[in-house]
Amino acid sequence: MHKILSFPRSHGFGPEQTYAMGQAYELVHGYIDRAGLTDGDSDGLCELVARRIIEKAASGETDPKALADYAILHLKD
C-alpha cells in the first residue's frame, strides 16, 4: 500500500474516475517497482505519479490503463 496524498477537490471526480485513478496509481507503481526506477525520493515520485494521473483524469479519461500510460510517459516532466 502506498502513501495517500491530499489534493484539492476542485475537479469533482465521480466514483468511476476515482476508482480508475486508484487503479492507475497501482499500475504505475507496479511498473516502477518492476523497472527498478525508485531513486530514493519515493514521496516525490508518488506525488508526481498522482499529479500526472489527476492531470489526465481532469480531461475526462476514465480508463485506468490510459491514465497509467500517461503518468508513465510523463514521469520525467
Image (cartoon, helix red, strand yellow):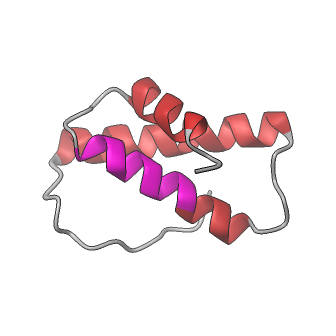
- Quarter of the figure with residue 45: bottom right
Residue at the image position 60 percent from the left and 60 percent from the top: 46
Task: Characterize the magenta stretch by its predominant secondary structure.
Answer: helix
Foreground of the two, 23 or 75 = 75
Q: Quadrant of the N terminus?
A: bottom right
- Residue at horizontal 45%, vertical 38%? 23
Residue 16: name its quadrant.
top left
Measuring from the top left, give residue 8's x and y in whole percent: 26, 73
Provide the residue span drawn in magenta.
48-58
Q: Does the magenta run of residues contain 66?
A: no
Give left or right: position of 46 versus 25.
Answer: right
> What count of labels does the image hold?
0
Between 22 and 11, the one nearer to me in the picture: 11
User: Is residue 63 shown left or right of residue 53?
Assistant: left
Q: Position of residue 65 (x, y in %)?
A: 46, 25
- Residue 13 horizontal/vertical position (percent): 18, 52
Q: Residue furthest front?
A: 77
Q: Residue at x 52, y 29 (%)?
A: 69
Foreground pick, 76 / 24: 76
Seen in the image, is 31 located left or right of residue 26?
right
Identify the residue at horizontal 15%, vertical 48% (top origin).
14
Q: Is residue 62 above or below residue 75?
A: above
Q: Name the spot of residue 70 as percent of width and height, x first.
A: 47, 34
